[in-house]
Amino acid sequence: MASSSSVVPKLNIPLHVKYIQNLDKKQDLAYHLTSHLRLNGIYWGLTALCIMGQHSALDREGVIEYTISCWDEEAGTFGPHPGHDGHILATLSAIQIMVIEDALDRVDIERVTKFLHSLINPDGAVSGDQWGESDTRFSYILLQSLALLGKLDTLSPETRENITQNIKGCMNFDGGFGTTPGAESHSGQVWVCTAALSILDREDLIDKDLLGAWLSERQLPNGGLNGRPEKLEDVCYSWWCAASLSIIGRLHWIDRDKLIAFILGAQDLEDGGIADRPGDWVDVFHTVFGVAGLSLLGYPGLQDIDPVYCMPAGLIASLGLRKPYIT
Ligand code: GRG
Ligand code: ZN
């Protein structure tokens, strides 16, 4: 469990690396109940390791083999676990893992691209699978997936414009974004929409001062950020909010040192991992977004993370996808 001491500890990298390496050793009920998130979990763990400079702490071949075993032949894409149906979220995680492991040549890129295109609705909204409802999360996932596959140019100008206008239609009076047109602003949705507009080279559609003000109001007196007004602070918003602020060039609008102290206070300094807030149980989701937040904030000794892709910045640069305005 994360400590709740008032002294700010340092980031304990060796302990967090060990925590991630041991994640699949404890196959308890919680492990089996989260099989629908297994491929996401591998991406989260691998990304946290990359940020901490320990990419090879997980067995490369094991990671690749597991990812390939999640292929859903009928759907022509990846599911989250062997035997599960293909889904856009698992598809992105699989692509991210294969990019990090430099193994994209083992993916049927044409079939995955076809699957992704099949989820675009005529109005530019994007669904998660052949049955599912649309959500701006899926618009972002589609765009990041196509970008990493080098297939953004398979979107016709008309489709690209429809997707852009659909995201713009989810913008609210407060400068934030929701899941669908008219839905309440939420920091997670703000990140997917600002990052999606960045991939589309349409950052001009964002009201940066208005959104920057809304995002910086998410910081609470204890240094942590919440996801929307009147809600509790949570380490994962160190990513959703800070990455959005970074994309719109307003990261300096929050108190960096107080946020760093909040994230560091949520570490479990006995067994490793980071929790949603000091005193709670750790998980790999809050571990990756905690270290990713620290990296964005310039915490020493960490590799740079790209705020648009939530992937190692060097890798995004090597694919020619790094935005020049991001420092
Ligand atoms: C490549 C990192 C990456 C992600 C892929 C799935 C996705 C794209 C993005 C998710 C964005 C999102 C909606 C994040 C928010 C997740 C979250 C903590 C939701 C909690 O919402 P509530 O309403 O919690 O339960 P609050 O804090 O508002 O009480
Ligand atoms: Zn959280």
Image: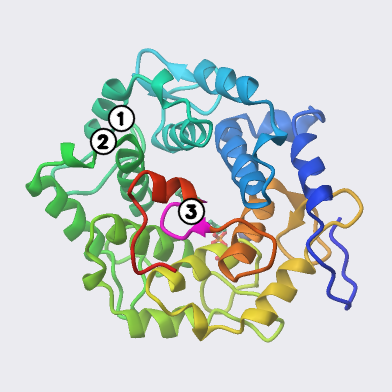
Q: Is residue 186 visible?
A: no
Q: Quadrant of ligand 2?
A: bottom right
> Residue at label 1?
130
Where is residue 161 shown, x and y percent of the image?
13, 54
SS assignment at label 1: loop
Q: Is residue 263 left or right of residue 248?
A: right
Question: Does the beta carbon of the residue at mark 3 sit less than 8 Å from ligand 1?
Answer: no
> Residue at label 3?
313
Instruction: Name which residue lies at 51% across and 73% down.
Output: 228
| Residue contact at pointers 1 and 3, CB within 8 angstroms | no
Chain-order first, disc 3 or disc 2 = 2
> Residue at label 2?
119
Foreground label between 3 and 2: 3
| Residue contact at pointers 2 and 1, CB within 8 angstroms | yes
- CA gap between label 3 and label 2 equals 28 Å
Magenta range: 305-311
Chain-order first, disc 2 or disc 1 = 2
Three-letter code, disc 1: Gln
